[in-house]
Image: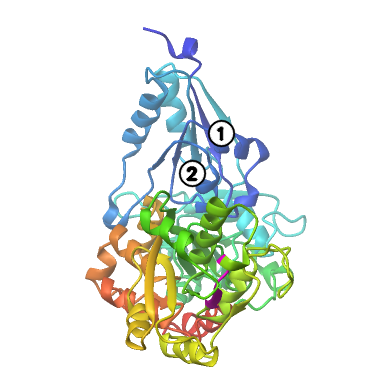
Amino acid sequence: MISNIERKSIVYLVGAGPGDPGLITRRGYALMRDADALVYDGLVDDELVRESHAPEKIYVGKTAGGHTLTQDEINDLLVDLATKDDGPRRIVRLKGGDPFVFGRGGEEALALADAGVPFEVVPGVTAGISAPAAAGIPVTHRKASAGVVLVTGNREDGRVRLPFRALVESGLTLSFYMGVASLSQITEELIAAGMESGTPAVVIQDGNLPSMRTVVGDVANIASLCDAAQVRPPSICVIGKVAALQHTLGAVIPRPLAGKTVMLARAEDLEYPEADGLRLRGARVIDLPVIRCVARAGDAKVDGLFAEVTSRDVVVFTSGVAAAMYLQFHRAHHGEAVDDAKRPRFIATTPAIRRRILDLEPDREEGADDATLFRQVLCPAQPGAAAVLELLRELRVEKGATVWLPRSASAGDEYAQALRGAGYDARPVALYDSVPQPIPADVRSRLLGGRVDAVLCMSGSAAESVVASVPELAEGDWPSILFAAIGQKTAAAMRRAGLRCDFVPDHPSRAEFFDAVVGPLTTGG
């Protein structure tokens, strides 16, 4: 049998940093990106996981109901991955913060050493120092504290067991990890050990993330203040004189969505830069592709469309993806050149779709006599099938004319039925399939664990994919989650899939959607 060293298998214990994916070290990022296998926990930002090219990604964080791999099982997993008989492997164990600061990296390193598996530790920025810094608290200060003590707030047998008197007598800054659930006991023990009740205390949730928020108080009232503010993990509690500096050094930028986590459920090939408005307001956005749009290459009906379409026809797009697929197939059938005899009139059902269509050919000049396919794209005054019919009448499109409806295979028949009812030859053609993508285990854990405040569905197929991946969302009430749809069609699809729909903007505009959802998300209803 070939030994681990001969096969050059190695495990890298990498610190991902304190939350912001930009705070991982350059070496850590390079190893994570090019790993053969990635083993990660719940404190690792999902953006890092997506950017890893690892063919094997294994989530070992906590899930709803407490289901998780034990530490011994994680140790065994790392050893098993490194001793597989399928050639050299680079296994990255990606952990929030620093691997050796309350990350059980030491236990994993010992297990690897005992098994003869080579490993390397790549340090990361730890939250106990960086989260206070982001909140305006230097954990050491020449006039306030000569040092900092990093302390775990984890319980043993239902109690936090720490040398409280020694901590108080040290006079140093105390930075507690994992102490939200036991904060009341911690503060009571500190006061009982001699700490003055007015000692400044600050709790930072989601440190170094856009969703970061702080609760400021003293050692006597910080636990009750956190209960009232519904602070949740991951949080760091800083107790000591330096915590008072937060008033002077802390950010004063108003962020109404601080502490909120929003999941954006979308198609893989559509991006929504407008969601940056939520980030600027303090929300943590989980940008999650739940749909992959797969072109129907070789489909006879698709080939028929591009063989039969003429300038006398009309093509109606009900999504930007359909238009992108249409352009892709047009070029596959006819090349870059555009024959005017094959150029129909194009209609987009909403202004947002029209803008996305025009962006498909960035060098175009609307109305110019060139090889641009979408030379002119019209749009009705209002969304919906009735408005499309009104536009066709304004264009004097005769009854019996062919109106093509390129779309997803899962699209509804609203427009086709309305067109046929008005006397047009409606021809729906499925250009692509919307293939559901599974929701990663870490995001599923956040959803079911009450750590997501809103689910924003950008299409009906995205809503269906969410339910297919997390059926529990359709089986319960989930009052803590705001379910929102970008438009009425998406809202109807959500309800058919079993999801509650709490919010729909007045108009299906992306910019309006992300602006309008701030209100109900801030107020919680």
Q: Secondary structure at mark 2?
A: loop
Which residue: 29% across, 67% down?
473
Magenta stretch, residue numbers: 342-347
1 or 2: mark nearer the eye: 1
Above or below residue 348? Residue 310 is above
Above or below residue 180? Residue 376 is below
Cα–Cα span, label 1 and label 2:
26 Å
Q: Which residue is more in the foreground, 445 or 244?
A: 445
Q: Which residue is more in the foreground, 291 or 288?
A: 291
Which tag, 1 or 2, sits closer to the chain's start?
1
Q: Is residue 403 left or right of residue 332?
A: left
Which residue: 43% across, 32% down?
107
Q: Which residue is more in the foreground, 167 or 508?
A: 508
Q: Is residue 56 left or right of residue 12?
A: left
Residue 246 location, x and y as percent? 68, 69
Examine the structure image and report whether residue 345 is included in the region drawn in magenta: yes
Q: Toward which corner of the image does residue 431 lie, by quadrant?
A: bottom left
Q: Could you say which disc has been placed on residue 102 in the image?
A: 2
Residue 218 location, x and y as percent? 56, 71
Examine the structure image and report whether residue 336 is included in the region drawn in magenta: no
Q: Could you say which disc has been placed on residue 34 in the image?
A: 1
Residue 59 location, x and y as percent? 39, 44
Figure disc tally: 2
Q: Which residue is more in the foreground, 105 or 56?
A: 56
How packed is label 1: few (under 14 Cα within 10 Å), some, or many (20 or more)?
some
